[in-house]
Amino acid sequence: MTIDAIATPVPAALLERPSANSDNELSTAAENLDEENAIEPVEEPLPLEQQVENALSDSVIPCSKKAVIRHFNLSNEKVDMLFKDMSEKGMIAKKANNHYYWVKQEPETV
């Protein structure tokens, strides 16, 4: 024990026995805390293809294999497959100089 522990008086409220009302108050307070601190379900991350599509459509990264490789830390083979799939779906196209560009248009709101 330290000297501070001996010298510090204990508040009377801590020494009193809780009444039946305080038990109800405690359980109500605990329920309120549970409601306030309720853990919301964590959303599952988007599939890689969707993440790449979002990054390209939002111009987060340029439409190039090198940018996708660096941003998502992927292999050349995986990015080749992604670009092939996106090209077949009409999301991206290749210019005469073999550079890709984003072509998929966002749906118009009416």
Image (tube, rainbow, N blue to C red):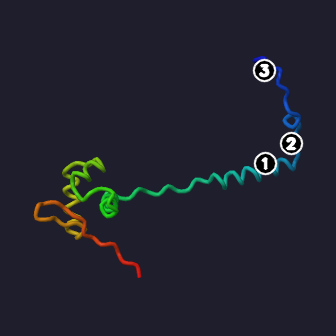
Seen from the viewer's position, the closer of residues 67 and 47 is 67
Discs 1, 2 touching: Cβ within 8 Å: yes
Disc sitting over residue 18 in the figure: 2
Question: Residue under circle 1?
Answer: 26
Front: mark 1 or 3: 3
Q: Is residue 28 above or below residue 106?
A: above
Residue at 30% across, 61% down: 56
Q: Residues within 10 Å of mark 3 (few under 14, many from 20)?
A: few
Identify the secondary structure beneath mark 3.
Answer: helix
Task: Estimate the spatial distance between the alpha carbons at disc 1 and disc 2, rounded to whole Å.
Answer: 10 Å
Tell me the kind of residue under disc 2.
Answer: Pro
From the top left corner, tell me how far across and down residue 106 is, in percent: 33, 72
Question: Residue under circle 3?
Answer: 4
Identify the secondary structure beneath mark 2.
Answer: loop
Discs 3, 2 touching: Cβ within 8 Å: no
The quarter of the image holding the C terminus is: bottom left
Task: Estimate the spatial distance between the alpha carbons at disc 1 and disc 3, rounded to whole Å.
Answer: 30 Å
Which quarter of the picture shows residue 3? top right
Seen from the viewer's position, the closer of residues 60 and 53 is 60
Tell me the kind of residue under disc 1.
Answer: Leu
